[in-house]
Image (tube, rainbow, N blue to C red):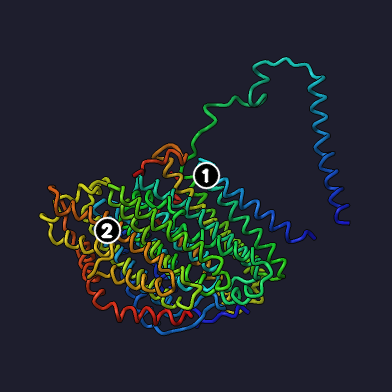
C-alpha cells in the first residue's frame, strides 16, 4: 500500500498546478479547467484521508464536490457561450470593457 | 519488497519508451524521403476535407449536453442509493425519490422552455 | 439507518420552505411565463420564510447529525438576508421592467441564493459551509450576467464566476486539509481534535485557505480585484443584492467557523487578520477617492466596509469576542439598510444602456428632487458614520469593542479611514447640492417604497440602537 504522504503531496502538487494555471493562462476555458484541477486535487486528498481514518465520510464528500463541479461547469460554459456570441473571444485579456 | 516492485515498473517504463524510440530512429536513418502533395495531406487516403476545420457547432448541441450532464451526475447519487436500497429506512427511500423529483423539476423546466426542441 | 427524522427538517423549516418554494416557482414560471406572477409569489415566499424564522427565534438545536445549527445567531442572519431579499425584489421589479428584460428566473435564482446564505449562517460542518457557499454563489453568477446581449454584464458574470470558483477551490482544499489534520469536518469535532492534533501545520494551512477563499467572497484586500468590475458590470439590483447578501453569508460562515472551531489557532492567525483589515481599509478607501462612476465608488466603499466588519474578527482570541460578534451583527444590519437605500437612489437615476451613473449625473439633484437627494444624503452620512444615522451606531459599537480588546491602534486606523471615506461620500453631496444640472428621474412606486423604508430605517433604527444591540447580543450568546 502506498503511504498517505504520497497522496497528500500529489494532491498538493495538483492544487498548486491549478492555482498557477488560473494565474497564468488567458483562455477562460483553460482557466476553468485549472479550477477543476483544484477541486479534484481536494477530492484526491479527501479520499486519501478517508482511507487513512478508515471511514466513509471523506468519500461521500467527493460525490458532493463532483455535483458542485458539474453545476459550475453548466453555468460557466453557458456564460462562456454567451460571451463568445457577443465578443467572439473568450480571452480574459480582452474582457476589459469594465475599467475605472 | 515494495522498492523491488517499483524498480520493476521503472524498468518497464524505460524499456517501453525505448523500443518505439529505437524504431523511429531506424526508420529515419533508412527510409527514403520523397514528399509530394498527396503524402503531406492531413488524411492521405479517404475523402477530401471540405471547408475549414474550425467550424462552430450549433448552440443547440450545448443545451442538449447540459441537460445530459444533469442526468449524468444523477448517477453519482442514485447508484449508491440503489446499492444500499435494501438497508434504507423510509426517510432514506423518500430522500432518493425526492432527488429524482428535483431532477424532474429541472427537466420539466427545460422542456417547457423549448430546450428539447431541435430547430 | 439514515438516522435522520422529520424533526431535522422542522428545525431548518425556513430554509426547507424557501427551497421547496423556489422549486415550485420553477414550474410556475415554466408553465405560466408571467414574470409578474413569479415575482409576487417569490415575495410571498420570502415573507412566509420571515414568519417561520420569527417563530423559530429562541430555538436552539442541531439538525442532521450536527451538520446544521439553528441558534439566535443563525436566525438573526436569516432575518437579515430575507429582508435583503425583499428589498432587492423591490429594487429589481421596476428596474427589470424599465430595462426591458423582466424574466421570472431572476427571482427564482435569488430565492436559491438566499437559501444558500441562510445555510451558511447555520452550517456547523465544513463541507456544508462549502456546499452552502456554492448554493449562494452559483445563482449569483447567472444573475450578474442576466442582461441579454450586453457585453459588460456578461463580462461581469464571467469574471465573478471565474474568481468565485477559484475561491471555492481554496475553501474546499482548506476543508480537505482540516479533515486530514483532525479526521472530522463537524465544527465541534474539529475543535476537540484540534486541541490534541499532531499536525498543526496542516490545520493552520487549512484554516488559512478557508480564510483566503471566504476573503475572496467578502472582498477583502488583496482578494478584492474582481469587485469593482463585477459591481459595475452587473445589473444594479444584482449589485445591491450581492454587495449585501454575499457579504452577510460570507461573514456569517467565517465567524462561526473561526470563533467556534479554531480558538487554538487564534494566536497564529490574529496578526494575519489585523494585516488584512488594515490593507482592506486603506486600499478600499483610497481607491474609492479616485472613482468617477458611482457604482465603482460604492464597490470600493463596500470593500472598505468589509474591512470594518473584519475588524470585529481581530478580537476573537480574547475574552471579548461575544461583544465582537454582537457589533459585527449590528454593523452588518447598518450596512444592509444603508446599502440598499443608496443603491435604490442609484437605480432611480440610472437610465438604459448604463448611463446616468457618473457623479456629474447627480448635479442639480438637490434642487429638482429634494426628497430623493435628502434620502441619498442620509445614506451617504450613514456610510461615513455620521450621527444621527445607523452607520454611526454601527461604527461606534465596533470601535468600542476593538478599543476594549486592546487594539487601540486599529481603532485609530478605523477612525482615520472613516474620515477619508467622508471625502468621497461628500463629493457626491457636493454634486447634488452645489452643481448645476438637470437630472431626469422616473418615479416608480416600488422603488420609492424601498427608498422610503430604508431612509426611515436608517434614522429610526439609530434611535432604537440600544434594544437592537441587545437583540444582537442575545443572538450571540447562543453561539458561545
Q: Where residue C119 sits: x, y (%)?
A: 46, 70
Measured in 3D between alpha carbons, the distance from the residue under mark 1 to the one under mark 2, in whole angstroms, is 42 Å
Look at the numbered disc 2 and give the secondary structure of its residue.
helix
- Work out whether C122 lies above or below C174: below
Q: Is residue C138 left or right of residue C86?
A: right
Look at the image and tell me whether residue C108 can be seen. Answer: no
The picture quadrant where one finds residue C369 is bottom left
Is the residue C325 above or below the residue C440 in the image?
below
Give the secondary structure at mark 1: helix
**Mark number for residue C297?**
none
Q: Is residue C138 above or below residue A98?
A: below
**Quarter of the image with the N terminus of chain C in it:** bottom right
In percent of width and height, residue C69 lies at: 49, 77
Image location (x, y in percent) of residue C265: 57, 69
* Chain that bears disc 1: A
x 38%, y 51%: residue: C230
Q: Nearer the viewer, residue C181 or C313?
A: C313
Residue under circle 1? A29
Q: Is residue C201 left or right of residue C296?
A: right
Q: Callout 2 environment at 10 Å: few (<14), some (14 to 19), or many (20+)?
A: some
**Is there any visible trace of residue C326 in the rendered image?**
yes
Dot 1 alpha-carbon crowd within 10 angstroms: few under 14, some 14 to 19, many 20 or more: some
Q: Quadrant of residue A52?
A: bottom right
Taking depth in this image into account, of B26 and B61 the one nearest to the observer is B26
Q: Is residue B26 left or right of residue C55?
A: right
Name the residue tied to disc 2: C422
Amino acid at each position: 500500500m502506498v503511504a498517505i504522504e504520497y497522496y497528500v503531496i500529489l494532491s498538493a502538487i495538483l492544487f498548486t498546478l491549478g492555482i498557477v494555471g488560473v494565474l497564468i493562462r488567458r483562455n477562460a476555458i483553460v482557466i476553468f479547467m485549472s479550477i477543476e484541477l483544484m477541486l479534484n486535487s481536494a477530492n484526491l486528498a479527501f479520499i486519501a484521508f478517508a482511507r487513512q481514518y478508515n471511514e466513509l465520510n471523506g468519500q461521500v464528500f467527493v460525490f458532493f464536490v463532483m455535483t458542485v463541479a458539474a453545476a459550475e461547469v453548466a453555468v460557466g460554459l453557458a456564460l462562456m457561450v454567451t460571451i463568445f456570441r457577443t465578443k467572439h473571444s473568450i480571452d480574459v485579456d480582452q474582457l476589459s470593457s469594465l475599467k475605472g | 519488497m515494495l522498492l523491488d516492485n517499483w524498480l520493476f515498473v521503472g524498468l518497464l517504463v524505460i524499456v517501453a519508451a525505448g523500443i518505439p524510440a529505437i524504431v523511429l530512429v531506424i526508420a529515419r536513418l533508412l527510409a527514403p524521403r520523397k514528399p509530394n502533395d498527396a503524402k503531406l495531406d492531413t488524411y492521405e487516403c479517404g475523402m477530401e476535407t471540405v471547408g475549414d476545420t474550425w467550424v462552430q457547432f450549433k448552440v443547440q448541441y450545448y443545451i442538449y449536453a447540459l441537460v445530459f450532464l444533469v442526468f449524468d451526475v444523477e448517477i453519482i447519487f442514485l447508484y449508491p442509493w440503489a446499492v444500499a436500497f435494501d438497508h434504507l429506512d423510509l426517510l432514506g427511500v423518500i430522500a432518493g425519490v425526492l432527488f429524482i423529483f428535483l431532477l424532474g423539476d429541472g427537466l420539466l423546466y427545460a422542456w417547457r422552455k423549448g430546450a428539447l426542441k431541435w430547430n | 439507518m439514515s438516522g435522520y427524522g422529520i424533526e431535522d427538517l422542522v428545525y431548518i423549516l425556513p430554509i426547507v420552505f424557501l427551497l421547496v418554494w423556489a422549486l415550485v416557482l420553477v414550474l410556475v414560471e415554466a408553465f405560466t411565463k408571467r414574470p409578474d406572477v413569479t415575482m409576487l409569489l417569490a415575495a410571498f415566499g420570502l415573507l412566509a420564510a420571515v414568519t417561520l424564522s420569527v417563530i423559530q427565534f429562541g430555538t436552539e438545536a442541531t439538525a442532521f447529525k450536527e451538520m446544521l445549527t439553528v441558534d439566535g445567531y443563525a436566525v438573526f442572519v436569516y432575518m437579515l438576508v430575507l429582508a435583503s431579499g425583499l428589498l432587492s425584489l423591490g429594487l429589481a421589479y421596476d428596474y427589470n421592467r424599465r430595462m426591458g428584460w423582466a424574466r421570472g428566473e431572476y427571482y427564482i435564482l435569488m430565492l436559491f441564493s438566499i437559501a444558500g446564505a441562510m445555510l451558511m449562517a447555520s452550517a456547523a460542518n465544513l463541507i456544508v459551509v462549502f456546499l452552502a457557499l456554492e448554493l449562494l454563489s452559483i445563482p449569483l453568477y447567472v444573475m450578474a450576467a442576466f442582461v441579454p446581449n450586453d457585453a459588460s454584464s456578461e463580462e461581469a458574470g464571467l469574471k465573478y464566476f471565474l474568481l468565485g470558483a477559484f475561491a471555492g477551490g481554496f475553501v474546499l482544499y482548506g476543508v480537505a486539509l482540516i479533515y486530514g489534520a483532525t479526521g472530522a469536518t463537524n465544527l465541534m469535532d474539529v475543535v476537540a481534535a484540534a486541541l490534541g492534533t499532531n499536525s498543526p501545520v496542516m490545520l493552520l494551512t487549512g484554516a488559512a485557505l478557508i480564510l483566503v477563499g471566504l476573503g475572496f467572497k467578502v472582498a477583502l484586500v488583496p482578494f478584492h480585484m474582481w469587485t469593482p468590475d463585477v459591481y459595475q458590470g452587473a445589473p444594479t439590483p444584482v449589485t445591491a443584492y450581492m454587495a449585501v447578501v454575499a457579504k452577510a453569508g460570507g461573514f456569517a460562515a467565517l465567524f462561526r467557523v473561526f470563533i467556534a472551531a479554531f480558538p487554538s489557532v487564534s494566536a497564529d492567525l490574529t496578526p494575519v487578520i489585523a494585516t488584512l483589515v488594515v490593507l482592506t481599509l486603506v486600499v478600499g478607501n483610497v481607491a474609492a477617492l479616485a472613482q468617477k462612476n458611482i457604482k465603482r465608488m460604492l464597490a470600493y466603499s463596500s470593500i472598505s466596509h468589509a474591512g470594518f466588519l473584519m475588524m470585529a474578527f481581530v478580537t476573537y482570541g480574547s475574552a471579548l469576542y461575544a461583544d465582537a460578534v454582537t457589533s459585527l451583527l449590528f454593523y452588518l444590519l447598518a450596512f444592509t439598510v444603508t446599502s440598499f437605500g443608496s443603491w435604490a437612489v442609484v437605480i432611480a437615476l440610472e437610465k438604459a444602456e448604463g448611463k446616468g451613473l457618473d457623479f456629474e449625473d447627480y448635479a442639480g439633484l438637490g434642487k429638482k428632487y429634494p426628497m430623493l437627494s435628502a434620502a441619498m444624503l442620509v445614506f451617504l452620512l450613514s456610510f461615513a458614520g455620521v450621527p444621527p444615522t445607523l452607520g454611526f451606531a454601527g461604527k461606534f459599537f465596533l470601535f468600542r469593542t476593538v478599543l476594549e480588546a486592546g487594539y487601540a491602534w486599529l481603532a485609530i486606523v478605523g477612525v482615520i479611514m472613516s474620515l477619508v471615506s467622508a471625502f468621497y461620500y461628500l463629493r457626491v453631496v457636493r454634486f447634488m447640492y452645489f452643481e448645476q444640472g438637470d437630472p431626469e428621474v422616473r418615479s416608480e412606486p416600488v422603488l420609492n417604497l424601498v427608498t422610503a423604508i430604508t431612509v426611515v430605517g436608517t434614522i429610526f433604527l439609530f434611535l432604537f440602537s440600544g434594544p437592537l444591540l441587545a437583540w444582537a447580543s442575545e443572538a450571540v450568546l447562543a453561539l458561545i
